[in-house]
């Protein structure tokens, strides 16, 4: 989970990643039961964010399920 930030990474909140302002739509815990993957949205475009790995634009929201 992202802790050292002044941003709230809760579902429904708006966060800044680089120069983009994105809404947190969903999050997943993969390894240690802490959120490791974040599904973000800007308009109709969805992004997957992994801390220390970066931001990836998804062609459709269903790409989130395969993560």
Image: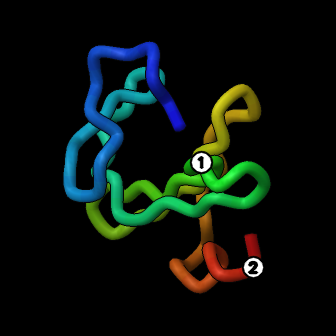
Name the residue located 52 percent from the left edge and 78 percent from the top edge: 61
Which residue is the site of mark 2? 66
Dot 1: element? loop
Q: Is residue 56 left or right of residue 11?
A: right
Q: Residues within 10 Å of mark 2 (few under 14, many from 20)?
A: few
Q: Residues within 10 Å of mark 1 (few under 14, many from 20)?
A: few
Residue 32 position, x and y percent, is 73, 49
Residue 23 sits above or below residue 64 on the image: above
Residue 1 position, x and y percent, is 53, 38
Q: Quadrant where the C terminus lies?
A: bottom right
Q: Find the residue positioned furthest to the left.
A: 13
Residue 62 position, x and y percent, is 59, 85
Q: Are marks 1 and 2 in contact (CB under 8 Å)?
A: no
Between the residue at mark 1 and the residue at mark 2, the CA separation in whole angstroms equals 18 Å
Which residue is the site of mark 1? 34
Q: Out of 9 and 56, give the one closest to the viewer.
A: 9
Name the residue located 72 percent from the left edge and 26 percent from the top edge: 52
């Amino acid at each position: 989970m992202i802790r050292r930030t002044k941003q709230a990474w809760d579902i429904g909140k708006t966060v800044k990643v680089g120069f983009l302002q994105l809404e947190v739509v969903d999050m997943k815990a993969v390894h240690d039961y802490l959120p490791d993957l974040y599904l973000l949205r800007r308009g109709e475009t969805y992004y997957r964010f992994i801390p220390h790995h970066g931001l990836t634009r998804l062609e459709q929201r269903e790409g989130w399920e395969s993560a």
